[in-house]
Image (cartoon, rainbow, N blue to C red):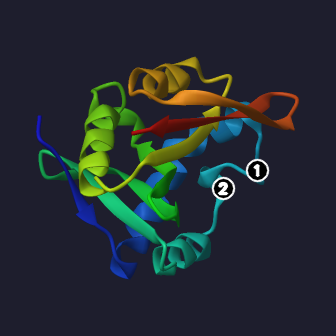
Amino acid sequence: MEVCLRKAGLEDAQIIHEMQVKAFESLLEKYEDYKTNPGNESIEKVIRRINEEQSDYYLINMDKVTVGAIRVVKVENMIYRVSPIFVLPEYQGKGIAQKVFKLIETLHSEAMEWRLDTILQEKGNCYLYEKLGYIKTGETKIVNEKLTIVFYRKEF
C-alpha cells in the first residue's frame, strides 16, 4: 500500500468537501454537533480555508486513489496544527492516517510542536494520536451532553 500526499488547490475544493461530508457523517449523526462537526461545513468554508495563507490542504492518495485529506495550519513560528484530517469510511482502519502523519511531519520538519483535537468519546481516535506520540494537554471543551473535545500536542 502506497500512501502519498498531493497539495490541494481551489480546483480540489469540491472533492475535499464531498469527502469531508462523507467521512464525518456517522459522527455528526452520533453526536449531533452541527456547529462544530466538519461534516456539516459548507463548501465556502473549505474554499476559505484553502485560500488562507497559513493553511495547506493535502489530498491523501492510497495506490493512486484519493481517500481523504488533511489540513495543516501554521499557528506560529514552528508550531503547526492539524484540522481536520479525514479518511473515507471504506478506507479507515488500514493504517493510512499513521502514514499521513509521518509524511506531514517530514514535509514540515521545521516544526517543534504539533497540535490537534479530537472527540474524547472516540477512543480509537485518541488511541491513534497517543500511539503517534501526541499527549493530552489537559484542556477539554464540552460541545454538548454527548461530546467533549480533547486537545493534544506533540513536541520535537
Which is more toward the observer, 84 or 67? 84
Q: What is the count of numbered marks?
A: 2
Give above or below for 70 relative to 9.
Answer: above
Q: Which quadrant of the view contains residue 58?
A: bottom left
Which is more toward the observer, 37 or 49? 49
Give above or below for 35 relative to 87.
Answer: below
As shown in the figure, which amino acid type bears the numbered disc 1?
Answer: Tyr
Does the residue at mark 2 contact the one at mark 1 (Cβ under 8 Å)? yes
Instruction: Describe the element under mark 1 as helix, strand or loop.
Output: loop
Q: Which quadrant of the view contains residue 147?
A: top right
Q: Is residue 15 left or right of residue 60?
A: right
Residue at image position (27%, 26%) is 94
Q: Is residue 100 left or right of residue 44?
A: left
Q: Which mark is residue 118?
A: none
Residue at image position (67%, 49%) is 37
As shown in the figure, which amino acid type bears the numbered disc 2?
Answer: Asn
Residue at the disc numbered 2 = 40
Q: Is residue 141 left or right of residue 151?
A: right
Residue at image position (38%, 27%) is 132
Instruction: Describe the element under mark 2 as helix, strand or loop.
Output: helix
Task: From the top left corner, tell me how far across and down residue 155 is, in percent.
Answer: 46, 38
Q: Is residue 96 left or right of residue 24?
A: left
Q: Earlier in the sequence, mark 2 or mark 1?
A: 1
Q: For the residue carrying disc 2, how many other residues have a C-alpha within 10 Å: few (<14), some (14-19), or many (20+)?
A: some
Q: Which mark is residue 34?
A: 1
Task: From the top left corner, tell me how far across and down residue 148 is, in percent.
Answer: 76, 31
